[in-house]
Amino acid sequence: MERRLAAGLATLLLVGICLAGCSSQPAQHATLKPTLEVSQVDGGPVAFQNGQPVPEFGVQPRTRLDLDGAWRFQGTELTDTFSFNDRHQTLTRLTAEAGDRLKDNFDDSRWSTSQVPGTFDLPPSSRTTVAWYRKTFQVPETWPERASLKFGSANYLADVWLNGRYLGYHEGGTTPFAFDPGDALRKGASNTLLVRINRTELGARIDLIPWGLTDWWEYGGITGRVWLEAQPDLAAVRADVVPHLDGADVFVVAHNQGPTVDAVTLQVDVLPAAVNQGNVLNPDPKALVVKGAEPVLSRTLDLGGLPAGAVRRVDAPFAVRNPVLWTPARPALYVLHVFLISSEVIKDELYESFGLRQIKVDPTAPRLLLNGTPVAFHGVATHDERSSPSSSGRPAGGPVTAAGELYDKLTQARGVNADLIRDDHTPPNALLPMLADRLGFALWEEIPLYHYTPETFLVAMQRGIPQQMLAEMLLRDFDRPSVLFHGLSNESQGVGERVSALTTLRDLDRKLDGTRLTGQAAYGSDPADPTSAPLDVAGYTFYYGVFYGGDLDIGKIQRALDRAHRTYPTKPIMILEFGRWADSPEEEQTQAQVFKVTYSAIEPLQDLQPDGYVGAAVWWSLDDYWTERPGLETERFGLYRPDGSARPVQALVASAYAATSTSGSAGRGAQEGIVSGGQGIPLGQTGAPARLLALTVYALGIPVLLVAGLVLLLTMSRRRTRAA
């Protein structure tokens, strides 16, 4: 069957370059602004969106009204010319387009229904570019005064109205966002939510992300959960845990939306946790807490008064004696429980799970260190797409909406002894890092700067949407120990523009987090690509003998790896893709041969070897998946067919990964019965100096006591001898 080969990627690239840079007329780029910004508040930097501190999006002990299920749906094929322009200029036109849909008495009974979360864009074809979603729901009379309207994701551009009032917009397909409905929300009455989704045809304009053709299916619609969550006047908005091997820095964001509050205290508890088959799929972190166990740490901080409207970031660091560290083979978790208290009354509380771990590059060699121990990862790529039940030998299609579906994917990954997951080219479904934390998989997350050109890099970075996507992904998964890597680009072109973009994104990543390693997936056809210089690791996609490099030849692959190492002698080399499609039984044998030869070149160079430097090898991919590439419907790169059966290459991967893995039995956290613990030690609130002092005392205190005790024993012994 004639398909792909070297011309496949080359054609895609040339089409992209022409769309981006060959137009005779200057492009009119979007003027719609990002909605997320980082501001300095009392206590440090805090991310804001739509006028509010960016919240956490997990399950919390607050009143909640789920808005999932059947929504009324109307799809159109409008030629949109104003969606992506500044709302100060376009809101009037958008509101006019919404028209009677905004009215309470609007009759939407003739509209079809669409499930939320879900998509209006099922493969193999879709002509919808703009869609209207409408939901009517009752809010109890007893609902608290304030609320937050939260969306797990909506692809690609969402404009939201509640009871006819415009709440705002969000651009970006796979990350969460929230609005303050204010007094537009009606308690004890019917409410109407109207959402306009624009999923512009890929390749139609160069100022969206991703901008061109994609080798996956870009599902449009309200793809994540939607819910209304009660918001107390005095709220613990989020708690971010920066892990260390001997403790953590905890940053809690408190927001007072009511009148001035006096005598506010913050209580921070660190609780032992355990994952088992009974709670592994439960999204509530409180379900992981070991019943009856004493807290590892409990401390109270006096915040004094919080004026009306105040946002404060509070630092509550701690050390832990005898901590249980997180690794894929031993994924130990803790649960953070935060209380905000005023006048001895609990005003709000928040739960987050986290793990203690450290990923870094060995300063003495091009080697990855996980918790100080050398590690080489063995990975598979996944997609946020339902695989089963298969239809006519193709994946079921549609975005994943249930934890059990992802659990099944990770069970497949465990079946080939993988310990690293690279999830597509977009921020993953939020359920994936949750399960990776609990089961024990490392994750490479990335934003969709996919097949970018010099011009599209400039346009995207000037708009600021990649920066927003990275920040939203980072903030959503801040407390996920499984997320070890942030990918900032995939198979892109240009040098100066790419280096500039990657440097800007790296700096943002370090400013907001700094506990993950940054990288990109550059074309392996150019091992001397210089653009990974600002990043922590040098990532490549390696398709020698498949898309480039002529015949499949171990010598060519080894020479390419050697050249990549000479280009980056101090960085681990990450092979983020290698593999081949298999459209027939004959091609399944060729697919297996590609693994044998390519992995045979990689394996002796893993960074565990004395002169090794390869930190990861990722097979593309775990499952087959739908694609929007012209002339194709399904990419059959999977180790597993859509019906769940294994291709011949699956057994080869499982055997090779098991023989060379350093992570042990990854993915078995729910079966291992791991219980976290240790003894917590509160540290000062003043930051690094206080932490350093406390840790110095902790480190030196025991030796000093031992020496003093020894001196005392010797003195007493001498006295006894003299007395005798």
Image (tube, rainbow, N blue to C red):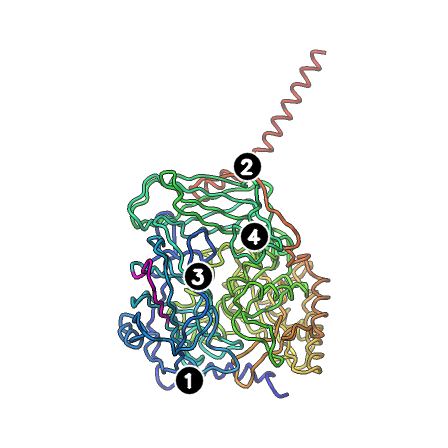
Amino acid at pointer 1: Cys
Q: CA distance from mark 2 to mark 1?
A: 63 Å
Task: Report the front residue among 508 and 113.
Answer: 113
Residue at 67 percent across and 75 percent down: it is: 556
Q: Are marks 2 and 1 in contact (CB under 8 Å)?
A: no
Sequence order check, earlier mark of 1 and 3: 1
Amino acid at pointer 3: Asp
**Disc 3 secondary structure class:** strand
Sequence order check, earlier mark of 4 and 3: 3
**Disc 4 secondary structure class:** loop
The disc at residue 22 is 1
Residue 199 image offset from top left, x and y in percent: 42, 76
Residue beneath disc 2: 698
Sequence order check, earlier mark of 2 and 3: 3
Q: Are marks 2 and 3 in contact (CB under 8 Å)?
A: no
In this picture, is 173 found above or below 327? below
| Mark whose residue sits in front, 1 or 4 | 4
Residue beneath disc 3: 66
**Disc 1 secondary structure class:** loop
Sequence order check, earlier mark of 2 and 4: 4
**Disc 2 secondary structure class:** helix
Q: CA distance from mark 1 to mark 4?
A: 46 Å
The disc at residue 358 is 4
Tell me where residue 376 sits by quadrant.
bottom right
Q: CA distance from mark 2 to mark 3?
A: 47 Å
Q: Are marks 1 and 4 in contact (CB under 8 Å)?
A: no
- Tell me which segment is drawn in magenta: 184-195
Residue furthest to the top: 723
Residue 360 image offset from top left, x and y in percent: 56, 55
